[in-house]
Every structure is written in C-alpha cells, then in structure tokens.
Image (cartoon, rainbow, N blue to C red):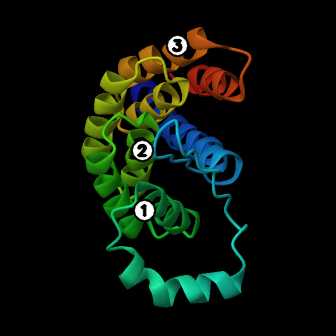
Amino acid sequence: MNRNTKFWISLAIFQVAFGFTVFALTREHYIEAAGPRVSAGPLRPMAPVQPGSIPQSDLAQFATATAFQTNSNDPVEIGRQADQFFANKQYDSAARLYERLVKLVPDNVDTYNNLGITLQYLGRSDEALRWLNEGVAVDAGYQRIWLTLGYVNSQVGNTEEARAALTKAIDMNPDTDIGQSAANMLAQLP
C-alpha cells in the first residue's frame, strides 16, 4: 500500500470515529440532559419533559387520547404532546406537532430549535437547517439554537458553518452547559 492510500484510509477511519463521537455527545445532551422545551410564550412557560419521566400508565392513556388532543389549537397542549413524542423517540409525530406549533406561535425560538433537532434525527438535515436558520432570525440571542445549528452543520459536513455557529454559542456564554457543549463539539471539528 502506498503512502497516499494509507492517508485516505486513515482519514476515513478518523471521520467515522469523529462522527460517532459527535453523535454520542450530542444525542446524550439533547435526549437525556436537555430534552426539548416549548412554551406558548412568556405568559405560560412549560417545564421540559425529560425522557423516562413519563410513567407507562400515562403513556397508555396518552396513546388513546392523542387523536382527540392533537386537534387542539392550544400551544401549551401541542407543545406538551410534541415533547412527549420526542421523549419517546417518535420523531415523525413530534416534528408534525412542532411544525404546527411554529405556525401558531411563530416567535418562540425554542420550537424552531426543537423542530430542527427532531428533523435531524429523522435524517432530514436540509429541512433542519432551514428551520434552525429561521429560528436564528427570530432570536439570534438564543444560545441553544446556535449549538444545534453547529451540530447539524457538522453532521452534514459544513465544517466552517458548524465552526461559526459553535463559536457564536461559546461567545454568548462559555460558562453555561450549552457553552461548554459547544466548546467540546468545536474541539472535535477537523
């Protein structure tokens, strides 16, 4: 094997290892540490739903009531249902409800962030980036959306865009969990 072939094989192995590392770090952060949070606005904030915090009996009851409740136009109820679907890894259902919530409450940057990461988990990266960029336009001062934007860009190979978004998240406040996660992701970029 010549030197050039060894280089490309080594690079491919590094890229695979890097991808798995970033995936493991961010998946843990979004699913277990942060969970999505959605609120109807400043008047009625919701607590985030943490994965594993929903008892099985409530899930069974939720499954039978979902068709009726999903027809609600109450942003808090839609957000709660979307968070439950996300926590249960039912990303298709979560994405539909987050999209609906964006239309009902278009100034809630949390919803754009949650929709973006949900679409990324569904493998719909282009849509995820579109929604995340729309969220940045709504509130460029929201640190979490910059972290998510950096993560999604890194996953699709947009290294410079990922670097810029993660740097922005760090610059906003390097001492928060989000700032530290952004710093860890930035250090992993090639």
Depicted 58 relative to depicted 99: above or below: below
Q: Nearer the viewer, residue 1 or 67?
A: 67
Identity, as a three-letter code, of the amino acid under mark 1? Ile
Q: Which of the two discs, 1 and 3, labels the residue nearer the N terminus?
A: 1
Q: Quadrant of residue 57?
A: bottom right
Disc 3 packing (10 Å; few <14; some 14–19; many ≥20): many
Label 1's element?
A: helix
- Residue 180 in percent (x, y) is at 69, 23
Quickly name the residue at label 2: 111
Q: Is residue 167 left or right of residue 75?
A: right
Label 3's element?
A: helix
Label 3 close to label 2 by CB (< 8 Å) = no
Depicted 122 relative to depicted 44: above or below: below
Please tell me whether mark 3 or mark 2 is closer to you in this view. Answer: 2
Q: Is residue 59 left or right of residue 72?
A: right
Q: Residue furthest top?
A: 171
Whole-number angstrom distance, CA of label 2 to CA of label 1: 11 Å
Whole-number angstrom distance, CA of label 3 to CA of label 2: 22 Å
Q: Which of the two discs, 3 and 2, labels the residue nearer the N terminus?
A: 2
Label 2's element?
A: helix
Depicted 100 relative to depicted 131: above or below: below
Inspect this view and state whether residue 1 appears.
no
Quickly name the residue at label 3: 167
Q: Nearer the viewer, residue 2 or 7?
A: 7
Quickly name the residue at label 1: 78
